[in-house]
Amino acid sequence: MTKPTFHDEQSLADAAEDLGNQALQQGIIHSFVVRHFADSRQFYIPDEHSEPLTPEEAYMQFKAWVEQAD
């Protein structure tokens, strides 16, 4: 398991997007959407969650899925 490489909200959101892209490439999910705001991001995973996820929630969800697939 790799050590997280984030130290603030921006780098956490980047790590969540990276994990989301990894989940896409592995076929774990079909899509996800990131809404960018001036000071934050919201993550949407169609067919999984109706409410937007925070970067922390998205990171944890994507991480769990990717680790289960490995």
Image (cartoon, rainbow, N blue to C red):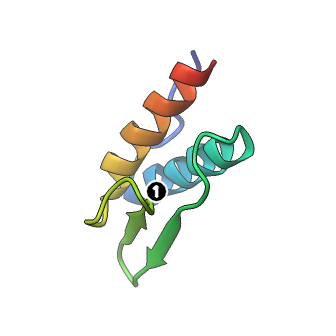
- Is disc 1 placed on a helix, strand or loop? helix
3 and 44: which is toward the camera:
44
Q: How many marks?
A: 1
Q: Amino acid at mark 1?
A: Ala
Residue 12: give x, y in percent of width and height: 44, 50
| Residue receiving disc 1 | 13
51 up-or-down from 12: above or below = below
Q: Answer with the quarter of the image where residue 30 lies.
A: bottom right
Residue 18: give x, y in percent of width and height: 62, 49
Mark 1 crowdedness (10 Å alpha carbons): few <14, some 14-19, many ≥20:
many
Q: Residue at x 51, y 69 (%)?
A: 33
5 up-or-down from 67: above or below = below
Residue 7: give x, y in percent of width and height: 42, 44
53 and 14: which is toward the camera:
53
Q: Is 62 left, or right, of 51 in this rendering?
A: right
Q: Residue at x 44, y 29 (%)?
A: 64
Q: Is 45 left, or right, of 30 in this rendering?
A: left
50 and 15: which is toward the camera:
50
> Which residue is farthest right?
25
Q: Quadrant of the C terminus?
A: top right
Residue 28: give x, y in percent of width and height: 60, 40
Q: Residue at x 52, y 21 (%)?
A: 68
Q: Quadrant of the N terminus?
A: top right
> Which residue is farthest bottom?
38
> Which residue is farthest left?
51
Q: Residue at x 53, y 22 (%)?
A: 67
